[in-house]
Amino acid sequence: MDFELSDDHELLRRTVREFAEAEVAPVAAELDRTKAFPYEIVAKLGRLGLMGIPFPEQDGGGGGDTLAYALAVEQLARVDSSVAITLCAHTSLGTQPIHLFGNEQQRREWMPRLCSGEILGAFGLTEPEAGSDAANTKTRARADGDAWVVDGAKQFITNAGTDISGVVTITALTGEGEISNLLVANGTPGYAQGEPYRKMGWNASDTRPLTFDGCRVPAANLLGPRGDGLRQFLHVLAIGRIGVAAMGLGLAQGAFDEALAYAKQRRAFGREIASFQAIQIKLADMATEIEAARLLVYRAALLKDGGRDFALAAAQAKLKTGRLAVRCAEEAVQVHGGYGYIEEYPVCRMYRDAKILTIGEGTDEIQQIVIARALSA
């Protein structure tokens, strides 16, 4: 086994790390405070080719692999989770369904603009009664001539309501017990985005409810075969877990970095607090768990890139890194003491951003079910 990154992967990791430190870190606190969507940063990510890393060059993508994508998400999440989730949701959930299941016309229409970052993609699965119970979709689409007429609602949807949002893939009942996926372009009559949620964290990302009221979607916007929606989105979610796992890994690493730096400069009782065993134990445990989690995330990405079954590894990585992000953020706040509770210190924001990583893209409990089923299969 080779645990070293290739030269190309290492170059990408370093490039994104430098970008995150130079472009994202200086504005992260202000974006969080004002809840402003990071349009300028997203545009720069597009120009760097990061919005379409894992997609083929013929579709406008970067021609990279899943590991490259995970590395980019990890480095962004070390600095700011709002920017990281914007990239993550756009790539894993917004663009991936069209790449995987779209026909030639659909890919030609959407992929180049999505991969360049000209527009953002979103994925509308969650509803008031369909989250962990993903198959309990209530949104309906009935055939009417050359269109589908959609009625229903989605909630907790990322990237659907910005000025550059372009398309959302939604799940809908197209028959009794039959779930299909439809592409709905922004601006389609009958499709409306609600006001952004007031959230605990990820304040600079776009998250809001969607409603469909007699929304006429062209019949040509059916994604893949009719009735194939459940299989499609379960596969997309498995891929998405690698991205969210990379986010958890990055946040944990970022929290550790902040804790270590603070412990080395903060003095108490006449010496740096990094010299106290109580602090050393926290840092040692964090560093060790982060390295273990990194192996899980990279392994899941490599399994996918190798064309092997990756669903179990992705669920394990997502479960591990979400919990680790929460723990590392909490420990980083503890190392900072009272200052960790003050917003001018990044660990305060990281603490608020971490919790959703145990909920989004499948709760911890859902990951445990996925893992247990895989083990007993």
Image (cartoon, rainbow, N blue to C red):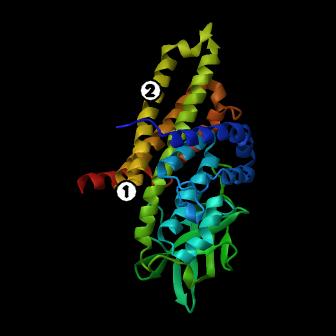
**Kind of element beneath mark 1:** loop
Quadrant position of the N terminus in the picture: top left
**Kind of element beneath mark 2:** helix
Q: In this view, does 5 lie above or below 66?
A: above
**Amino acid type at image mark 1:** Gly
User: What residue is rendered at 43% in x and 28% in y?
Assistant: 288
Q: Is residue 251 above or below residue 129?
A: above
User: What residue is rendered at 57% in x and 65% in y?
Assistant: 59
| Label 2, residues with CA under 10 Å away: few <14, some 14-19, many ≥20 | few
Q: Residue furthest top?
A: 270
Task: Residue under label 1, please give it.
Answer: 307
Quadrant position of the C terminus in the picture: bottom left
Residue 173, x across and y down, in percent = 47, 78
Residue 71 can be seen in this image? yes
User: What residue is rendered at 50% in x and 50% in y?
Assistant: 243
Q: Which of marks 2 and 1 is nearer the N terminus?
A: 2
- Looking at the rendered image, the disc whose residue lies closer to the viewer, 2 or 1, is 1
Disc 2 to disc 1, C-alpha distance:
34 Å
Q: On the image, which quarter does residue 255 sit in?
A: top right
Q: Which of 274 and 78 is in front in this view?
A: 78
Task: Residue under label 2, please give it.
Answer: 285
Residue 127 can be seen in this image? no
Q: Which residue lies furthest to the left in this view?
A: 376
**Amino acid type at image mark 2:** Asp
| Label 1, residues with CA under 10 Å away: few <14, some 14-19, many ≥20 | few
Residue 347, x across and y down, in percent = 62, 33
Question: Is 323 situated left or right of 202 in this image?
Answer: left
Q: On the image, which quarter does residue 2 sit in?
A: top left
Residue 199, x across and y down, in percent = 63, 51
